[in-house]
């Protein structure tokens, strides 16, 4: 009886912790580019929202790279690709985890890109977690792996990196990898409950 109750209580704790919605943020900054992108958990995947200013009208490659080193944008390594796939578009079956397609800048002169989409491959938990990695904006349009360039299947031939920022925790403020995400009152209740069933 006690073992079964302990099992049910542990399931409750895991469910309680995992139901907490997480949001991460990356600030893209360079000499000409400035923007802020948020990644928020939804039931359909991560919702990616925000705005970026500083580039002329057009499409520009937008990827998550494997490392969190932004000493220079080139220091962030290759696209985040734990499965060893070829490069593709955000809606392609075969793609890098970090392949987020293009962002569209509009306007005359200094353009603005308003970003709002949901991606069901990237995550803030588990193997596909992008937390601590780098969001990168490129100088050219990503051909989504469909071009004739020799770089098409690795980078989408999107060119150099014009801005980047590390993806970090925005909310909740409590540690994401700790049991402290469960409030102390809940823990006390569960401990009391386990004691009752034990006696």
Image: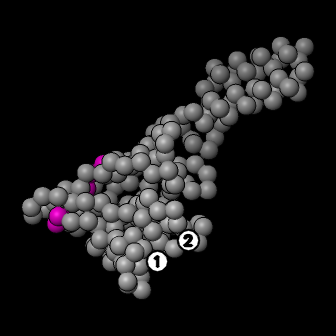
Residue 158 picture quarter? bottom left
**Is residue 85 depicted above or below 1 in this figure?**
below
User: Sequence-wise, which precedes: disc 2 or disc 1?
Assistant: 2
Q: Over which residues does the magenta segment extend?
A: 50-57
Instruction: Tell me if residue 56 is in the magenta stretch.
Output: yes
Q: Nearer the viewer, residue 18 or 93?
A: 93
Image position, residue 24 (x, y; %): 44, 47
Residue depicted at x 60% and y 26%: 183
Give the Cα distance between marks 2 and 1.
9 Å
- Secondary structure of the residue carrying tag 1 is loop
Q: Is residue 13 above or below residue 1?
A: below
Pick whichever, 91 or 39, lies toward us.
91
For the C terminus, which image quadrant?
top right
Q: Position of residue 26 (x, y in %)?
A: 38, 54
Q: Which residue is mark 1?
A: 154
Label at residue 85: 2
Name the residue: 57% across, 42% down: 176
């Amino acid at each position: 009886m006690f073992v079964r109750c302990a099992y049910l209580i542990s399931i409750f704790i895991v469910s309680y912790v995992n139901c907490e919605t997480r949001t991460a943020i990356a600030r893209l900054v360079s000499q000409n580019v400035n923007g802020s992108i948020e990644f928020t958990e939804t039931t359909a995947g991560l919702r990616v929202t925000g705005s970026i200013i500083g580039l002329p009208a057009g499409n520009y490659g937008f990827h998550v790279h494997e490392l969190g080193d932004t000493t220079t944008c080139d220091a962030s390594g290759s696209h985040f690709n734990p499965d060893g796939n070829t490069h593709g578009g955000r809606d392609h079956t075969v793609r890098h985890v970090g392949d987020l397609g293009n962002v569209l800048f509009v306007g005359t002169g200094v353009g603005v890109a308003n970003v709002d989409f949901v991606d069901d491959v990237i995550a803030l938990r588990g193997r596909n977690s992008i937390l601590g990695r780098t969001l990168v904006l490129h100088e050219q349009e990503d051909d989504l792996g469909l071009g004739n360039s020799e770089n098409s299947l690795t980078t989408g031939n999107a060119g150099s990196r014009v801005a980047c920022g590390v993806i970090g925790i925005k909310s909740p403020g409590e540690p994401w990898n700790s049991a402290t995400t469960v409030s102390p009152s809940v823990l006390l209740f569960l401990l009391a409950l386990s004691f009752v069933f034990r006696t």
